[in-house]
Image (spheres, rainbow, N blue to C red):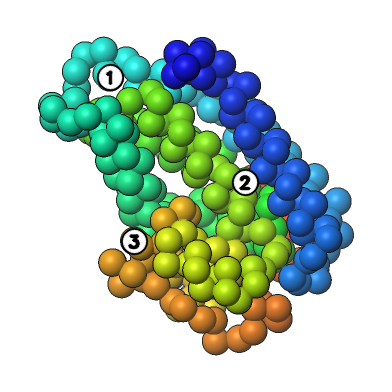
Amino acid sequence: MSDALLANQANVRLICFAGIFAAMALWELMAPLRAPDYPRWLRWSNNLALVAVGNLLLRLVFPLTAVAFSGWIQQRGWGLLNQLALPGWLTGACALVLLDMAIYFQHRLFHVVPVLWRLHRVHHADTGFDVTTALRFHPIEIALSMAYKFMVVAVLGASPEAVLLFEVILNGMAMFNHGNVSLPGPVERALRPLVVTPDMHRIHHSTLMCEANSNYGFNLSCWDRLFGSYTAMPSREQVTMPIGLDQFRSRRETWLDRLLILPFQRN
């Protein structure tokens, strides 16, 4: 079964991505939490165009996917998990949790290091907050994130199956917790101790930097609590709180060319 999944990983990714994206887009259409600042077609066309540019850069820079790289590492017996005599299911579970923690720290790093924050501003400059925001990253940040992922996979010795599952979960959870939706109160209270919800992550996209520098998690919500970066509630209402960065709020800033040069602007 795992061999079949790995052999068809591109199809697995595409099916999962398309299914979750469509579900979130329909949810946003039927029950949007916030009114958009700009037309959906304008934001979506440029956000998705940025995704295409980022994927093209990955194809040019990295000859292997993270899954293929993890198989190469595993064949050589490298990495922490390959040194431990653990059952396969436990090794996979450890890999998923440790990879998620690594992404949490990567996200914090992109907020703390000035040159990395300039790249990450492309993500935060979106004045909307919806499923396409989850995909809106500068191509250079995407490439750096892939290099970081390769390093973590090599250190951990995560299996190809674990890496594939992690990437599918991470991508799906990012689209979920960037959704322009809100969960019913009881569901929110039940899920938030376990995973990052849209209301939790929306705080991270506040224009207030004290809130933007919190709630870094993308999947498991425990890391923010463990490492002191959790904000439970925003200072303003979820429906009306300003989203984005104050210096990048004009309609022109939503265009692809402006997104590509945004990290290199002085302001």
The numbered mark at residue 73 is 1
**Residue 210: % across, % down:** 45, 78
**Residue 156: % across, % down:** 24, 34
Label 3: which residue? 223
Mark 3 neighbour density, 10 Å: few (under 14) some (14–19) many (20 or more): some
In front of the other: 133 or 22: 22
Q: CA distance from mark 2 to mark 3?
A: 22 Å
In the displayed structure, would residue 42 be above or below residue 182? above
Q: CA distance from mark 2 to mark 1?
A: 28 Å
In the displayed structure, would residue 257 be above or below residue 252? above
Q: Secondary structure at mark 1?
A: helix
Is 44 left, or right, of 10 in this rendering? Answer: right
Of pointers 1 and 3, the one earlier in the residue sequence: 1
In front of the other: 251 or 10: 10
Type of amino acid at the residue the image marks with label 2: Leu
Residue occupying the point 70% across, 36% down: 18
Residue occupying the point 52% across, 36% down: 168
Residue occupying the point 75% across, 43% down: 22
Q: Nearer the viewer, mark 2 or mark 3?
A: 3
Residue occupying the point 22% across, 29% down: 87
**Residue 78: % across, % down:** 19, 22
Is 108 left, or right, of 136 in this rendering? Answer: left
Type of amino acid at the residue the image marks with label 3: Trp
Of pointers 2 and 1, the one earlier in the residue sequence: 1
Of pointers 2 and 3, the one earlier in the residue sequence: 2
In the displayed structure, would residue 185 be above or below residue 42? below
Label 2: which residue? 135
> Could one spot residue 189 in this view of the protein?
yes
